[in-house]
Image (spheres, coloured by chain):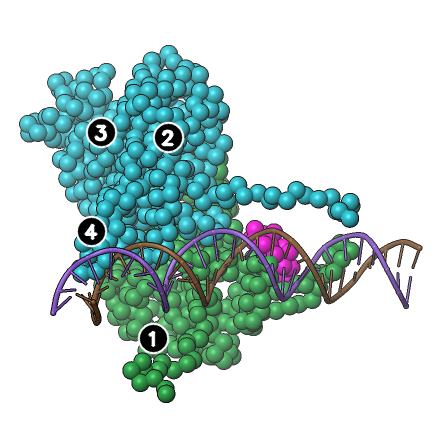
Chain colours: A green, B cyan, C brown, D purple
Amino acid sequence: MKRTSRDIRTTNRYQVLRQIIAESPTSRQELAAATGLSLATVATLVGELLDLRMITEVGFEDSAGGRPRGLVAVNASGGALIGVDIAETYVHVELFDLALNVLARAEEDVRPGESLPEQVVGHVAAAVGSVVAQAGIEGARVLGVGVSVPGQVDRATGISEYAPNWDWHDVPLLDLLTEHIAYPLYLDNPLRAGAVAELWFGAARGRGNAVVVNLGTGVGAGLILGGGLHRGVSNSAGEWGHTTIVLDGRLCRCGNHGCVETYVGAPGIMLNLRELSPGSTLLHPEDQTATIDALSRGMLEQDPVALKVVRDTARYLGAGIASLVNIFNPEVVVLSSWVAATLGEPLVAEVREAVARHALPRPMAATEIVLSPIPTDPACLGAATFALEGALQSVGQRNGKKRTTPARSRTAPPS
Amino acid sequence: MKRTSRDIRTTNRYQVLRQIIAESPTSRQELAAATGLSLATVATLVGELLDLRMITEVGFEDSAGGRPRGLVAVNASGGALIGVDIAETYVHVELFDLALNVLARAEEDVRPGESLPEQVVGHVAAAVGSVVAQAGIEGARVLGVGVSVPGQVDRATGISEYAPNWDWHDVPLLDLLTEHIAYPLYLDNPLRAGAVAELWFGAARGRGNAVVVNLGTGVGAGLILGGGLHRGVSNSAGEWGHTTIVLDGRLCRCGNHGCVETYVGAPGIMLNLRELSPGSTLLHPEDQTATIDALSRGMLEQDPVALKVVRDTARYLGAGIASLVNIFNPEVVVLSSWVAATLGEPLVAEVREAVARHALPRPMAATEIVLSPIPTDPACLGAATFALEGALQSVGQRNGKKRTTPARSRTAPPS
DNA sequence: TGACTTTATAAAGCCCCTTTCCTAACCCCT
DNA sequence: AGGGGTTAGGAAAGGGGCTTTATAAAGTCA
């Protein structure tokens, strides 16, 4: 809420590093043009990042007849970031270098019984240890660990206020993790992680207003507004999945009827399929992934049932996303998470059409609808991005230069 | 998008003046506490406002044993602001002093045939002239004129991109108005005007995140996010009225089916009534205002039909507003505009209940749902507020201290 | 009247960004 | 090989802003 000139600096630092990561190597000139900052500012920020060893100078580039431009690039080995994606059935951990390449990966299954925070934390700790070992990185290089945990999270206190899948209430997750993990920790939820990942590395890069629609088992949206993540007053913004689109429609696990999620989440899509063709071979009653995969293949083979199911789903999605477009007037809507990735471009094409039918022409004209270009788990990447942001933020911290002269007692001055 | 330290100053100036208007007289101490700024900053800002004659020193207040606090208050006669609310059937103009009291009022009817921009502009010019004359104000005191015009507006160029009621397309409204009105002009739409009015003077004061729901003939929402108005990428955010809540529901004038507006806008409410009790005496088929008035009276008299209609309407509203709560996680939802004002607290009570049934518990717990406390036409007040913001913004402008030394030709230097 | 409080203003310090000036580095041409 | 010409990059100066600290101003109370 309260803005200070330091926030401007932080924003600019983000922008510059983002640009460098996106386009390495690059010159200061190019950075200035891309960010709109002055050359001088870019130069000092680049200097800072060089000092931090996050980027390095990598040579020169001919200029049109004059002094060559110095090129900088991400120093991939300048540090490591860890992203943790805690989900209902698994804990997924990835270790990234600073170019955001995945250096190591670990996955632990969370079995249905294991709903105690300690058990989950155990899995996380094990997986984090594993990726660090695999990558052969010294601990000091790890700049931070971002953790995405479903449900409502208070990132300031590190408390998981509510996690629906395990019925957690006010679990002090950060404290529990701190006991096992020595690196700086950053907690948030997958919606916001996904949004930040798109903002830094995906389809929302350079956009001030974007909506990242998450289509998985659950459904939600991450909001980029005014160039930054919108959290809402209690850090629970983005619960788009429980928007009513069919009054008195399907029963949702939230207790309501007709939520978007019940039509376009993976279980909802399965229900769409079952209602259309109860005996379809595409349906794998107990396996969401298999069913969505089958639908994807079915579409490629022009299977009429698959096509119809996807079209129906796109219709629901279209109505829901059109509302988002009308309300936010974003530059881009990004479809993300595994269901979107699996159904891919054919789904997006249907969605584009459906949204165009429902949205108002003016906001629609300004909005692009695209598939997330992020290849890996966006929650992992986003969580790692939180760690990166955290590492960059502390750069600006006053560097502890306390007064060196000892306080002298006024009552007993030196003679 | 691009933030500079000047924006911080502007924000702080807004905050201080807002606080002074809200609580006059007040001391610098109180302002510092309320805004979170340092005493020094508050002092300089107060100094600026004193110089502008927007506020005045009005005496002193005892402090606990020390120097008394100087008190400042709005200098009501320090300037005048004009708010223009252009609507489908009328043009409403109000002239405010700096304490935002209405000094004069004028209304012109726009007849069904008069859909030409020139005709509407003529009404506006006449009404503006009238309020200035009524108030007996010298023209120089008028700080600006805010104009709220329905539909999509490009406030930068002053073009009314699209006004549904008159089928305007890309009308250069600002240029047309400039020909008749000599004061600084500020154009925007009623949704955003309403939101700004709430932010400055209403239920959203001091809140960083608020949603202002407009219930009139049309329906929409103004969004206060991160302490400021959210405009979206093409200044058309807030079109909440065309959110689908009943897939394949009632036909809306936007061409879609099941939009919120078709259930909770005034015509929608009339339809709710007709469907429930086709022959009801509450229904005035051609008169929205009369029907809503009748419903309001009916509720007071415990008329079962009226109660049921309002409850049904609240149910739709509840589903729609719950979605907003889930998505934005605002501190407050404000119900505004004439339908909300007429149905009043009984409606709000029903809505509160309905929203609580639909929204997720966490965001719901952080959200208050209230009726707009603004007594007059919120679009007028909001439009005037745009003018006030405009007047404050130009304070910071570099005060024309251009280079005084004439540029000397380099090829012919003075000997 | 003097000590103590509290408020308000002035000064100094720090942060940030930009503009301007100057040096560095490279090209090409003579 | 040695100058222009050109472009890049850095240092310094300048302009905003906000805060902390010191000082002046204006009371109260003993």
Q: What SS does tag 1 mark? A: helix
Mark 4 Cα-neighbour bin, 10 Å: few <14, some 14–19, many ≥20? some
Residue B183 point in image, percent of width and height: 42, 27
Mark 4 or mark 3, earlier in chain: 4
Residue B220 point in image, percent of width and height: 32, 34
Q: Which residue position holds label 4?
A: B61
In this view, the mark in front (2 or 4) = 4
Mark 1 vs mark 2: same chain? no
Looking at this view, is A241 or B15 the one in front? B15
Mark 2 or mark 4, earlier in chain: 4
Mark 3 or mark 2, earlier in chain: 2
Q: Is residue B198 left or right of residue A309?
A: left
Residue B99 point in image, percent of width and height: 27, 36
Q: Is residue B281 on the magenta stretch?
A: no
B213 is higher (above) or lower (below) than A231:
above
**Image point 55% across, 63% down: which residue?**
A45
Q: Amino acid at mark 1?
A: Thr
Residue B291 point in image, percent of width and height: 18, 21
Q: Amino acid at mark 4?
A: Glu
Q: Amino acid at mark 3?
A: Val
Q: Chain of mark 1?
A: A
Mark 1 Cα-neighbour bin, 10 Å: few <14, some 14–19, many ≥20? some
Please report contact status of discs 1 and 4: CB closer than 8 Å, yes or no.
Answer: no
Q: Which residue position holds label 1?
A: A178
Question: Picture quarter containing residue A67?
Answer: bottom right
Q: Residue furthest bottom?
A: A415
Q: What SS does tag 4 mark? A: strand
> Mark number for residue B339?
3
Q: Is residue A25 left or right of residue B31?
A: right
Q: Amino acid at mark 2?
A: Arg
Q: What SS does tag 3 mark? A: helix
